[in-house]
Amino acid sequence: MSIRARKIPVLIRFALHHSRVLQIAVIIGFWALGEGLVRRFDLPVPGGIIGMVLVLALLASGVISPLSMRRGAYWLLAEMLLFFVPAVMAVLDHHEFVGLLGLKLLAVIVIGTGLVMGGTALTVDLCYRWQVRHALH
């Protein structure tokens, strides 16, 4: 392999580590790949989940480093509110959500969120206690 051919992966890795736009493009690429797999194999799972599992597998195996995705992921998380603007606009278009139906939906969302957060906290607490108890023996 020539010196020039060996430098190409290094240059790609350098560009990926330092370019937020390229990292976002890679994240979108994984989402698109997941969407393609869902459509191709008629999977009952959202394409974003499949893409996320692919990224997780590549991160866990060391094929890609967290540094390769960090800046793009932080930007997407920081701007997450922008992704909810269409949902707010949909609520404004449907006036029935402002009345009793909206209150019922809000109650379900608040209670559901509380149950999920409480269940997660309880599970983490129980797992932590189990881990501490078994680490001492």
Image: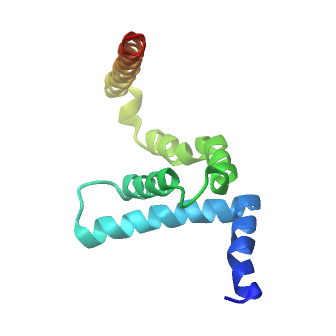
**Residue nearer the viewer, 84 or 91:** 84
Q: Residue at x 45, y 39 (%)?
A: 91
Residue ID at (34%, 55%): 46
Q: Which image quarter: residue 119?
A: top left
Q: Percent x, y for residue 37?
A: 33, 68
Q: Position of residue 98 (x, y in %)?
A: 41, 29
Query: Does residue 81 appear to the left or right of 89 in the view shown?
Result: right
| Horizontal relation, residue 133 to residue 68: left or right | left
Quarter occupied by the C terminus: top left
Farthest residue toward the bottom? 2
In the depicted structure, whether residue 74 falls above or below residue 44: above
Residue at far front of view:
137
In the image, is residue 84 above or below residue 58? above
Q: Is residue 14 above or below residue 62?
A: below
Question: Which quarter of the rendering shows the N terminus?
Answer: bottom right
The image's colour scheme reads rainbow
Position in image of residue 67 (x %, y %): 67, 52
Which image quadrant is residue 74 in? Answer: top right
Count the numbered circles shown: 0
Q: Position of residue 116 (x, y in %)?
A: 36, 23
Q: From the viewer's perspective, tell me whether residue 108 is left or right of residue 42.
A: right
Q: Is residue 29 above or below residue 81?
A: below
Instruction: Give the residue at x 48% y 63%.
Output: 30
